[in-house]
């Protein structure tokens, strides 16, 4: 059994050291790959010094592009399971094994770390929380199961899903609710796991304008459903 932790990063030289160290502590059996999305700081150097494999992109591709690169690497190296975790420290590596267990057992194909089932250590802006609630409701209706945190980037999944991400449509900017809906419609099984999250700094996911995000995600969900007709 081979596990790879994929960390998409953009300007995380201040946070990536502790993230890598915690992963080594709580998931020592896992390999680590940092996908640097054309950072302008010393993220690459710091990550390499901590012993992580680093894939540096020549220009900024956005969160989806960075993740695609990590998934392709996982497949090329024949990893069985992949954990996606952010490089800003908001995801606690001590929950990696909790996320992996149902996937390794074959109970589900993907687990999502939900901050709303666990303890939240930071405040979410009101407007953003409303948007998250709307997409959680839409996703829950389509999946016919309760999903509380569609925007959580803390996820674990098997090789089949990694191959699906690489060989099918995968958003280049904000892979959230639309991806979950696409996975469900394809027949993959999804489950949420309670986790604690912490407040992150400006990261690879920063700069998302709430109104644009809501508009973009609505269009993406609609396109996902139309492709299935």
Image (cartoon, grey):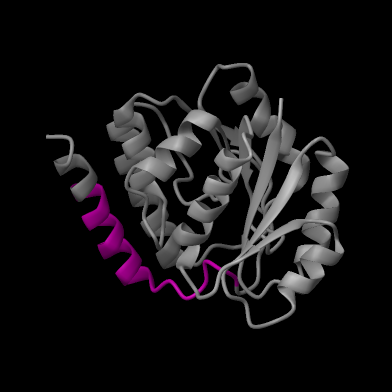
The magenta stretch is 203-222
The structure residue drawn at horizontal position 53% and vertical position 55%, both measured from the top left corner, is: 69
Residue 70: in magenta span: no
Task: Point out the image quarter for the N terminus.
Answer: top right
Name which quarter of the figure residue 189 lies in. top left
Q: Is residue 75 above or below residue 86?
A: above
Q: Is residue 171 above or below residue 187?
A: below
Q: Main secondary structure of the magenta part?
A: helix
Q: Is residue 195 above or below residue 206?
A: above
Q: Residue furthest left?
A: 229
Q: Residue furthest bottom?
A: 40
Judge whether residue 119 can be spotted in this image: no
The structure residue drawn at horizontal position 26% and vertical position 53%, both measured from the top left corner, is: 220
Residue 211: in magenta span: yes
Q: Nearer the viewer, residue 72 or 206?
A: 72
* Left-right relation of 56 to 172: right
Task: Point out the image quarter for the C terminus.
Answer: top left
Name which quarter of the figure residue 103 lies in. top right
Q: Nearer the viewer, residue 76 or 160?
A: 76
Q: Nearer the viewer, residue 146 or 110?
A: 110
* Left-right relation of 66 to 135: right
């Amino acid at each position: 059994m081979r596990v790879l932790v994929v960390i998409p990063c953009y300007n995380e030289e201040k946070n990536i050291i502790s993230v890598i160290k915690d992963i080594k502590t709580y998931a020592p059996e896992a390999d680590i790959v940092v996908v640097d999305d054309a950072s302008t700081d010393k993220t690459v150097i710091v990550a390499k010094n901590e012993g992580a494999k680093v894939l540096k992109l020549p220009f900024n591709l956005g969160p989806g592009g960075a993740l695609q690169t990590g998934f392709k690497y996982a497949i090329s190296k024949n990893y069985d399971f992949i954990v996606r975790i952010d490089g800003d420290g908001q995801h606690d590596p001590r929950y990696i094994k909790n996320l992996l267990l149902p996937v390794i057992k074959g109970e589900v194909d993907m687990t999502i770390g939900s901050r709303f089932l666990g303890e939240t250590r930071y405040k979410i802006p009101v407007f953003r929380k409303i948007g998250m609630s709307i997409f959680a409701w839409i996703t829950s209706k389509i999946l016919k199961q309760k999903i509380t945190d569609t925007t959580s980037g803390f996820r674990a999944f098997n090789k089949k899903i990694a191959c699906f991400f690489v060989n099918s449509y995968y958003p280049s900017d904000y892979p959230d609710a639309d991806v979950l809906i696409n996975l469900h419609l394809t027949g993959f099984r999804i489950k949420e796991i309670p986790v604690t999250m912490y407040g992150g700094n400006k990261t690879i996911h920063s700069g998302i304008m709430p109104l644009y995000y809501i508009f973009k995600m609505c269009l993406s969900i609609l396109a996902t459903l139309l492709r299935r007709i």
